[in-house]
Image (spheres, helix red, strand yellow):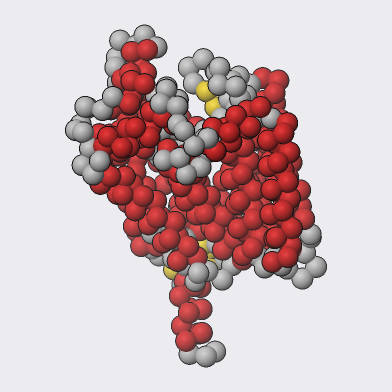
Amino acid sequence: MTEMVYGATPVAGGEPVLPRWWRTIDKWTLSCVFILFGIGLLLGLAASPPLAEKNGFADMFYYVKRQAFFGTVGLTVMVAITMMDPARVRRLAVLGFGAAFVALLLLPFLGTDFGKGATRWFSFGFASVQPSEFLKPAFVVTAAWLMAASLEIGGPPGKMYSFALAGIIVILLALQPDFGQASLILFSWGVMYFVAGAPMMLLAGIAGLVVMGGFFAYENSEHFARRIDGFLNPTIDPTTQIGYATNAIREGGIFGVGVGEGTVKWSLPDAHTDFIIAVAAEEYGLLLVLIIISLYATITVRSMWRLLRERDPFIRLAGTGLACAFGVQAFINMGVAVRLLPAKGMTLPFVSYGGSSVIASGIALGALLAFTRTRPQGEIGDILIRRGR
């Protein structure tokens, strides 16, 4: 019987692609992603009309329709990537990393800040693109490839190369300034480095460098210092975004004030993006917020659980980095809204409005689902381990 190859694993060649994909994919994670996107559209119906009215659009659901379009693109790309083998995902990620890195270098010259004090986007009139959103998943996979190569006998110093790449990216992002994405890149690298077997003392030294970098940024960046000072201030200015969000969450209670009855969407300029969770809390209450948290937790924990059985170092490292980056980004977004963290300007994956965000999230989850697909070598390895062979 002829055989096809899925990654490095022989798979029966007679089984069609779609049935094999459906049998091996993590259906719980896939379902959670689609539910999150559906919740995002639901919240967009509440949060987007004020923005459409402010910008003079006759169609009050203009931004909801755009989100539906970009989301459809993102989810289609996600499903397409899940059908790829890990080797192909790696090759595309490395190419994507190169393109996103070049785009990041060009931002200071060709980018725009949209009046937000940070040059993070390329504007094309009909749409804008944020390169750092696409850089994150591509960097994680590229760094995992370098780290896995360093584990081979006679392999290159991949850990050092990946750290150098992470350092350059962090500096470029800090110059925008975009300290939220910079911290997420550094966190993802640190998690993969830890899984790859980094000494604890070295990790402690890197953590010390991060703290020193934070102090340096506080002293030399007005943007960074303003956000830290606002976070440390014991009193909340009710006219700031944090003030509006905090009040909305408080007003929502357990069951919310009712669909369409919330007022925070008229006050918050970023109610449809960075503070979408405040809209959810006000109109639907704590109940919907807990559902959203459980969906993110399910995706992250299930992915990590499936990766525990993975024997390929590259897949294990890349999958861990992607899962942790996804979960931590959601935590940061919601943590900012409830004032557990300083303001970061980071979207809630699949829920916040934004073409770059939802498409990049689709790419990241597509790669993660591709890495966590059930592969025969994992099952065979488990059987042999249980039998003591």
Above or below — where is 234 with respect to 86? above
Depth check: give the residue in front, 330 or 22: 330
Q: How many marks?
A: 0
**What is the residue that sits farthest to the bottom in this orientation?**
388
What x and y, as percent, mark residue 95?
65, 42
Q: Position of residue 90 (x, y in %)?
A: 60, 52
What residue is rendered at 50% in x and 69% in y? 308
Q: Nearer the viewer, residue 271 or 37?
A: 271
Q: In percent of the image, x 61 and y 44: which residue is there? A: 183
Percent across and percent down for residue 132 are: 59, 35
Q: Can see residue 88?
A: no
Residue nearest the viewer, comparing 81 with 144: 144
Evaluate whether residue 120 shows in this view: yes
Q: Quadrant of residue 196?
A: bottom right
Residue at the image point whose x is 71% and y is 20% from the top: 109
Q: Position of residue 136 (x, y in %)?
A: 58, 43
Specify the quadrant of the image occupied by residue 203. Answer: bottom right
Q: Nearer the viewer, residue 133 or 239?
A: 239
23 lies left or right of 316: left
The quarter of the rendered structure image containing the C terminus is bottom right
Residue found at x 61% / y 65%? 195
Residue lying at the far front of the rendered structure: 234
